[in-house]
Image: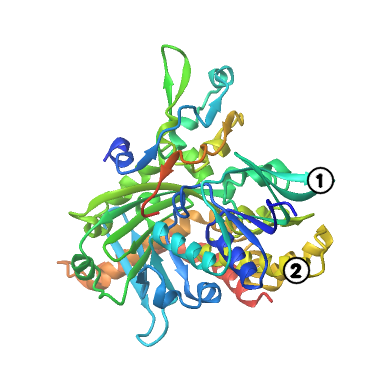
């Protein structure tokens, strides 16, 4: 089962602005880019064309793993504004 | 008097926050309980179980009145080899009160908040506290997205990610080894099928911890619980190990689901929810400063989890209650100083929370050091012993026994077990 099927089970309310912010200049120099695999929702992906990290913040499960895992402490992590983000029905 | 001033503001309406709030309200104190979700439980996820002792302490009526899924009457361990497995389970006697219950967090957390409201708590959902308002170094209220609220005391119960503690400088930066990343899937299956599959009835339930197999040599454990009409299956792994294996956490869960000892439980069941959450498992040494002027910290925000025994919600409830009891004494003497609130730490030290965390302060690093023995060698040897006893082969038993003996000797398991036994004995004798 792929991640999109898993995420499709969830109810989200998408904010217009991202609650996750990175400085791409720092990401460019990052060798291991752990955010690409520690995130349980595949929020982070690498765009070869632009040499930038793409953040699909609308899929975020608000777990906070990326913030701790980032070796450069380069993820400015906050909770989404109220009424936005993921909403669990079972938890 | 200011409309926005109350005795205590509790930030976060999870198990610790709601326990703090209801304890304060029952003592006649004015308390505001904030929640960043549309409603309590919206943002919460756990394994998981709530524990009878501490839950009864806060909600004496929960067994009769609360939306419980099932009691956990059978506690199993499933040891995995590549394809083989061994399952053993402890059942507590029919007449005893179950030790724990499974709940749906959306329903459960809401019920708890309703009880708190009945007790007089002012509940403020859709309220995101951005920071604590300090005056001369003392907390005097909270700043939300919309407005400021003021109080004599703030109890911080905003969970593992506690941004508030970080801003206040009350805790050090969390290390990779201090947290586990947990992913869980909830599967829908009829009550009847669940009862058949797990050999339980409407009054009983099944819980399991899963070791070895795809999780071998990792600080990682799988978990499985029966709810009334759903099954929760998940896995947790320490963030440092997750980084090492360069695997996505849900891929580890997928591997676990492929094992025949696990796949049989979720066969033909429909996935209805995927979720993820961090658990603070750094133990005693990761506990932040628990109090300051006008401030106390409870639950996951205070890293109060005993991962050796999978206990967290019970510590959350108890710490919330102890923070509230301290707040009541502080309010009665109109003293909200750091010195007065240090009573909270004393209460935690006198309770099972800091006693157990202190006892196990070196246990996680010990387990990590012996992870190969605990998660691979034991699973394999125990499976092989049971296979030898139960398997009818064409070889004479003398040869089968000899093969087993050689395997055991070759694994060096006896020698490797000595420090583990000694460690366990030391824990048993520690006062």
Q: Which mark is residue B135?
A: 1
Q: Is residue B405 visible?
A: no
How far across and down, in percent of the image, does residue B333 sit? 82, 69
Residue shown at 42%/18% (left/top)?
A: A47
As helix, strand or loop, the secondary structure at mark 2 comes to helix
SS of the residue under disc 1: strand
Instruction: Out of B244 and B387, give the one closest to the viewer.
Output: B244
Q: What chain is tagged by disc 2? A: B
The x and y percentages for residue B233 are 34, 55
Report how far apart the C-alphas of labels 2 and 1 lie in the structure: 26 Å
* Rendered image quadrant of residue B404: bottom left
Residue B365's x, y, as percent? 60, 55
* Image quarter (top left, top right, bottom left or bottom right) of the C terminus of chain A: bottom left
Corner quadrant of residue B210? bottom left
Residue positioned 47% across, 42% down in the render: B242
Disc ID at residue B346: 2
Q: Which label is found at residue B425?
A: none
Chain for disc number 1: B
Q: What residue do we see at 33% from left, 39% from top?
A: A7
> Horizontal placement of A31 versus A7: left or right?
right
Q: Nearer the viewer, residue A33 or B291?
A: B291
């Amino acid at each position: 089962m792929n991640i999109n099927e898993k995420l499709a089970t969830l109810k989200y309310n998408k904010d217009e602005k991202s609650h996750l912010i990175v400085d791409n200049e720092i990401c460019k120099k990052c060798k291991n880019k752990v955010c690409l695999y520690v995130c349980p929702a595949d929020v982070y992906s690498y765009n070869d064309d632009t040499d930038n990290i793409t953040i699909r913040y609308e899929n975020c499960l608000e777990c906070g793993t990326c913030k701790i895992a980032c070796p450069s402490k380069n993820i400015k992590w906050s909770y989404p504004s109220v009424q936005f983000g993921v909403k669990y029905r079972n938890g | 008097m200011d409309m926005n001033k109350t005795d205590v503001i509790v930030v976060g309406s999870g198990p610790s926050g709601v326990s703090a709030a209801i304890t304060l309200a029952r003592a006649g104190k004015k308390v505001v309980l904030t929640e960043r979700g549309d409603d309590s439980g919206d943002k919460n996820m756990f394994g998981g179980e709530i524990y009878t002792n501490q839950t009864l302490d806060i909600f004496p009526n929960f067994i009769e009145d609360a939306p419980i899924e099932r009691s956990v009457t059978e506690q199993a361990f499933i040891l995995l080899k590549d394809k083989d497995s061994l399952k053993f389970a402890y059942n507590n006697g029919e007449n005893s009160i179950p030790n724990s219950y499974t709940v749906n967090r959306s329903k459960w957390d809401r019920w708890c908040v309703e009880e708190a409201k009945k007790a007089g708590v002012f509940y403020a959902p859709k309220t995101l506290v951005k920071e604590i308002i300090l005056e001369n170094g003392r907390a005097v209220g909270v700043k939300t997205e919309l407005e400021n609220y003021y109080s004599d005391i703030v109890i911080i119960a905003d969970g593992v990610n506690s941004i508030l503690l970080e801003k206040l400088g009350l805790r050090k930066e969390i290390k990779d080894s201090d947290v586990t990343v947990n992913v869980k899937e909830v599967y829908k299956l009829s009550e009847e099928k669940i009862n058949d599959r797990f050999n339980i009835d409407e009054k009983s339930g099944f819980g399991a911890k899963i070791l070895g197999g795809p999780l071998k040599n990792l600080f990682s454990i799988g978990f499985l619980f029966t709810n009334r009409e759903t099954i929760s299956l998940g896995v947790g792994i320490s963030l440092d190990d997750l980084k090492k294996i360069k695997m996505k956490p849900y891929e580890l869960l997928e591997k676990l689901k492929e094992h025949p000892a696990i796949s049989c439980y979720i066969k033909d069941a429909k996935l209805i929810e995927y979720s993820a959450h961090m658990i603070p498992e750094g133990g005693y040494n990761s506990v932040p400063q628990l109090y300051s002027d006008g401030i106390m910290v409870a639950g996951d925000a205070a890293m109060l989890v005993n991962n050796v025994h999978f206990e967290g919600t019970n510590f959350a409830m108890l710490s919330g209650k102890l923070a509230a009891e301290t707040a009541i004494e502080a309010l009665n003497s109109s003293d909200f100083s750091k010195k007065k609130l240090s009573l909270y730490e004393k209460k935690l030290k006198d309770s099972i929370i800091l006693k157990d965390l202190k006892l196990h302060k070196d246990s996680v690093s010990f387990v990590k050091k012996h992870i190969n023995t605990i998660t691979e060698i034991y699973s394999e040897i125990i499976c092989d012993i049971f296979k030898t006893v139960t398997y009818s082969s064409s070889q004479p038993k003398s040869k089968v026994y000899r093969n087993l003996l050689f395997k055991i000797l070759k694994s060096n398991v006896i020698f490797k077990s000595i420090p583990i036994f000694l460690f366990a004995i030391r824990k048993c004798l520690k006062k």
